[in-house]
Image (cartoon, grey):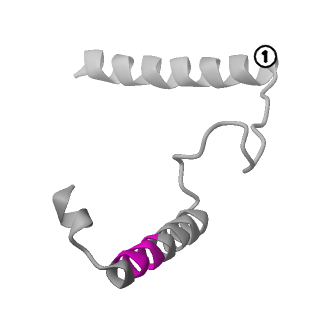
Amino acid sequence: MNELLNLSVAKLKRMATLKAKIERLQSQLEALAGSSSRAPGKGGRKRRKMSAAARRKISLAAKARWAKVRAAKKAK
């Protein structure tokens, strides 16, 4: 903290300017990268809702795949 008290006004202003520039660049970088650190509900794409029938169909397909894997494992 003492280091800040010993800095000149010009240096403090320069530091504030650089900090603001870094924050702007950081927000631009996050926008380009599509950062996942956004809080939910603040912009971005809306989540698609899957019907119960679609979830069931996916579940049955996954269970069938794993049953096939287990059956192949037992056959060996």
- Left or right of residue 63: residue 18: left
Viewport quadrant of the C terminus: top left
42 and 68: which is toward the camera: 42
12 and 49: which is toward the camera: 12
Q: Residue at x 78, y 42 (%)?
A: 46
Q: Name the element at disc 1.
A: helix
Circle 1 Cα neighbour tier, 10 Å, few/some/many (<14 / 14–19 / ≥20): few
Q: Position of residue 55 (x, y in %)?
A: 71, 21
Image position of 49 with respect to 45: above or below: above
Write the start and end of the magenta stretch as one range: 12-19
Quarter holding residue 68: top left
Image position of 43 with respect to 30: above or below: above
Q: Position of residue 20 (x, y in %)?
A: 50, 71
Image position of 22 with respect to 41: above or below: below
Quarter holding residue 42: top right
32 and 67: which is toward the camera: 32
- Disc 1 residue type (three-letter): Ala
Quarter holding residue 14: bottom left
74 and 8: which is toward the camera: 8
70 part of magenta stretch: no
Q: Position of residue 30 (x, y in %)?
A: 54, 63
Q: Residue farthest to the left?
A: 2
- Left or right of residue 57: residue 72: left
Badge 1 is on which residue?
A: 52
- Left or right of residue 49: residue 19: left
Q: Residue at x 21, y 70 (%)?
A: 6
